Image (cartoon, helix red, strand yellow):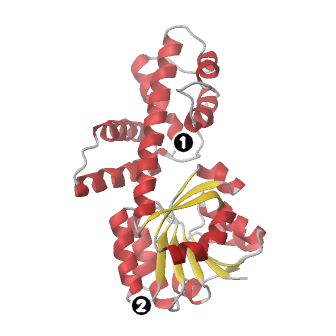
């Protein structure tokens, strides 16, 4: 059984690492939050003292971190993965970061004969707990094939989308569509409520038709029950849409719809809702219409 390193035990990383332990993998873990490490060690992992230490003790090193700067620091910084990983080992970055940063990190690792795939995920905390995430991968076919059994423990699907960075491009596309769905749902349910029509009945009437979606089924019931605990926090979706906008500007793609939704999320963050689930985007429309959507 391969030894797996896992760095980053937050909302997503903690259940993902626990699923690997349940599947029988030997796990060495690290996080800057000691309580998170203690919880995963209690589930059967071994604690590492640094990313370098984790990498030195692992064949595959998984990272699940907030954004590009954290991934660069953990992989390339002092006591980083690059200082401990053996030639031939594979870094599997499951963070959602800028595609060009993935490529930059991969080039520096390749100079040390360390391989890398980028493998961001979609599905949020519920699917991380279930082990049914959608995983979007960029990298070499050989590296993908070697890591696939590990990825399939954490996800219901893992699709190789292209070379390194392609996983994060795909994740950015995913985040555009998710944000657009949530915004449209919020606007629609606010319209229904303000018009005197039961939003729950509207939801049940449309969910089987063309307007139905995984996003609608996941978020509409929570919104109507006024449950805005994350989930996937607004501030994290802002981070992803920031990477969308940066990438779009770099490659010459205007993104007017994404820019509008980004500003809606920024307004909610200013209102103190950055820690709320991205389903709380409906509160932007509720504030404009002076109405609350509920069952």
Q: Where does the image place residue 250, in percent across and percent down from the top left?
A: 24, 58
Can the viewer see residue 6?
no
Residue at x 62%, y 72% (from the top left corner) = 34
- Within 10 angstroms of label 2, few (less than 14), some, or many (20 or more) residues? some
Can the viewer see residue 294?
yes
| Residue in front for this viewpoint, 160 or 132 | 160
- Within 10 angstroms of label 1, few (less than 14), some, or many (20 or more) residues? many
- Which residue lies most toward the front here? 141
Q: Earlier in the sequence, mark 2 or mark 1?
A: 2
| Residue in front for this viewpoint, 271 or 202 | 202
Quadrant of the image for the N terminus? bottom right
Residue 22's mark?
Answer: none
Q: Nearer the viewer, mark 2 or mark 1?
A: 2
Looking at the rendered structure, the secondary structure element under dot 2 is loop
Disc 2 to disc 1, how far (Cα)?
Answer: 40 Å
Q: Where does the image place residue 59, in percent across and percent down from the top left?
A: 60, 85
Label 1 belongs to which residue?
Answer: 277
**Count of all numbered marks drawn on residues in the image:** 2
Q: In this image, 245 relative to 128: left or right?
A: left
* Residue 216 falls in image quadrant: top right
Residue at x 56%, y 37% (from the top left corner) = 215
Q: In this image, 125 relative to 115: left or right?
A: right
Quadrant of the image for the C terminus? top right
Looking at the rendered structure, the secondary structure element under dot 1 is loop
Q: Where does the image place residue 176, in percent across and percent down from the top left?
A: 41, 44
Q: Where does the image place residue 199, in percent across and percent down from the top left?
A: 59, 18
Is residue 69 placed above or below 258 in the rendered structure?
below
Residue at x 50%, y 61% (from the top left corner) = 120
* Residue 67 falls in image quadrant: bottom left
Label 2 belongs to which residue?
Answer: 112
Q: In this image, 90 relative to 253: left or right?
A: right
């Amino acid at each position: 059984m391969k030894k797996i390193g896992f760095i980053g035990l937050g909302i997503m990383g903690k259940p993902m690492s626990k699923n690997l332990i349940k599947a029988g993998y030997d796990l060495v873990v690290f996080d800057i939050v000691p309580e998170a490490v203690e919880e995963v060690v209690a589930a059967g992992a071994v604690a590492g003292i640094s990313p370098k230490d984790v990498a030195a003790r692992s064949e595959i090193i998984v990272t699940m971190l907030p954004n590009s700067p954290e991934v660069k620091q953990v992989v390339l910084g002092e006591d980083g993965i690059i200082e401990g990983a053996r030639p031939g080992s594979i870094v599997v970055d499951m963070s959602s970061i800028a595609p060009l940063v993935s490529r930059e990190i991969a080039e520096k690792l390749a100079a040390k004969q360390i391989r890398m795939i980028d493998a961001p995920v979609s599905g949020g905390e519920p699917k991380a707990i279930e082990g049914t995430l959608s995983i979007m991968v960029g990298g070499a076919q050989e590296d993908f094939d070697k890591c696939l059994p590990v990825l399939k423990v954490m996800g219901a699907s893992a699709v190789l989308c292209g070379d390194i960075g392609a996983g994060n491009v795909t994740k950015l596309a995913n985040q555009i569509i998710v944000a657009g769905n949530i915004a449209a749902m919020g606007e629609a349910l606010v319209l229904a409520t303000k018009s005197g029509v039961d939003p729950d009945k509207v939801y049940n009437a449309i969910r089987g038709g063309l307007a139905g979606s995984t996003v609608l089924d996941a978020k509409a019931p929570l919104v109507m029950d006024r449950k805005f605990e994350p989930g996937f926090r607004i501030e994290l979706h802002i981070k992803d849409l920031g990477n969308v906008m940066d990438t779009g500007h770099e490659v010459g793609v205007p993104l007017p719809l994404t820019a509008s939704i980004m500003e809606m999320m920024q307004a909610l963050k200013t209102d103190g809702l950055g820690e709320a689930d991205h389903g709380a985007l409906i509160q932007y429309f509720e504030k404009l219409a002076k109405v609350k959507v509920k069952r």
